[in-house]
Image (cartoon, rainbow, N blue to C red):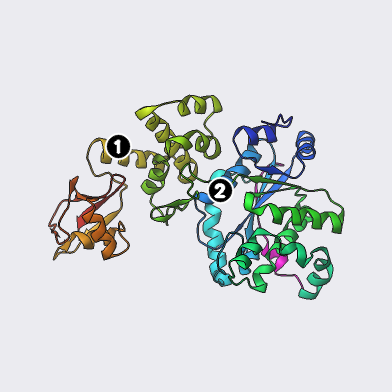
Amino acid sequence: MTEYKSDLLRLLSERGHIHQLTDAHGLDALAQKEVVVAYNGYDATASSLHVGNLASVMLLRRLQQAGHKPIALMGGGTTKVGDPSGKDESRKLLTEETIASNIAGIAKVFHRLLRFDDSATGAQMVNNADWLDQLGYIDLLRNVGPHFTVNRMLTFDSVKLRLDREQPLTFLEFNYMILQAYDFRELALRHGCRLQLGGSDQWGNIVNGIELTRRMNGIELFGLTTPLLTTADGAKMGKSVNGAVWLNEELLPHYDFWQFWRNTDDRDVGRFLRIFTDVPLDEIVRLEALEGSEINAAKVVLANEVTKLVRGEEAARAAEATASATFAGGGLGADLPVWHVPAEGCTIIDALVGIGFAASRGEAKRLIAGGGAKLDGMAVSDENQAISLKSGEIRLSSGKKKHGILKPL
């Protein structure tokens, strides 16, 4: 591990946040002598960020913890274009009203994880539509265009991926890297921003912004990327069997969010505790050394701490209580998903699809055939089994980890 002198880079290194640095020595020296203003950008393609974005939000939190100033850049302008990075096809174009609504939803997590105030290290939320919407096309071509060559732009992974697969890359998307570089320049001029943060797939875009600002304004900027986050089995971080693990409770119940972390692979516990929680490092060393069934205690700590940060203390307590009632006591738990059985009754297939444990009737049948569907802990073998509830409630399970409650309508 590189020996850094600044509190900022030491903290980021110890927590496993550093993958690449454009100028490690220069940034280390800068962070020792002044407050570093740094940003990460978030396009408003959905009304919530997901777990895959959480590492970058925690990076902004670490920056503030080390005495520096974070900027959360909302992509009100760039969302209208669409980032081709890691995408196999063009994004659907969103209306301005949808983008504004999505930004309002995304903002919630930042207000939980960052401190917003007027101090020198108080976080800021900025929208790149403030300058991108005002750009004249001819001005952009004349002032910014000469600093980019198509030859080099064609070498970027975000472009090469689509071209190699003979998938369309629109001229609209091709401009994205220019706009992101322009964002860094604008933030440097408007807010004194010296550092851009991002995932490893953003390295080329970050370097573009550094070079553009140096050529146009002679300002020295820096870039830092985080490692590509995958789980121990190679899966991309942020996805579950049911899809994206959303940070906002409107899109994913507290219990499901908590359970995602509780289901972490044993091999990932220590790494995830470092990146996604504020648990002290010496305690993490103790927890990740647990073996056998004892490692489950570390997973509960991980689930509680992440849920507490992202959803609040009450959500973490409720989710753990639900898990305890469901797994330990055989109870139902108050935070499980609920589906109401019609007065005339239903079949087990109706219930599995209705509660979201199966995406189709065919998938429900396969789940039953494999012995994965259970009512109150008892496996269901008959796909035509009827469920009728006049009162009370029963537990519906899919496998060992997914549970819900059936109640009368």
Identify the residue shown where x is 56% and y is 48%: 111
Which one is earlier in the sequence, the residue at label 1 or at label 2? 2
Answer whether residue 82 is visible to the viewer in this image.
no
Callout 2 amino acid: His
Q: Is residue 171 above or below residue 125?
A: below
Callout 1 amino acid: Ser
Q: Secondary structure at mark 2?
A: helix
Q: Secondary structure at mark 1?
A: helix
Q: Is residue 65 left or right of residue 368?
A: right
Q: Is residue 42 above or below residue 93?
A: above
Task: Name the quarter where the N terminus is drawn.
Answer: top right
- Magenta segment: does it hold 129? yes
Q: Is residue 286 left or right of residue 204?
A: left
- Callout 2 environment at 10 Å: few (<14), some (14 to 19), or many (20+)? few
* Residue 149 in picture, x, y percent from top left: 79, 65
* Residue 95 in picture, x, y percent from top left: 56, 72
Image quarter of residue 358: bottom left
- Magenta segment: does it hold 112? no
Residue carrying label 1:
324
In this rendering, the label closer to the viewer, 1 or 2: 1
Q: Farthest residue in the bottom direction?
A: 138
- Badge number at residue 41: none
Q: CA distance from mark 1 to mark 2?
A: 30 Å
Q: Is residue 381 above or below residue 164?
A: above
Answer whether residue 164 is visible to the viewer in this image.
yes
Residue carrying label 2:
111
- Of 74 and 87, which appears nearest the observer? 87
Image quarter of residue 97: bottom right
Identify the residue shown where x is 78% and y is 49%: 192
* Residue 409 in picture, x, y percent from top left: 20, 61
Identify the residue shown where x is 62% and y is 46%: 116
What are the residue bounds of the magenta stretch?
120-136
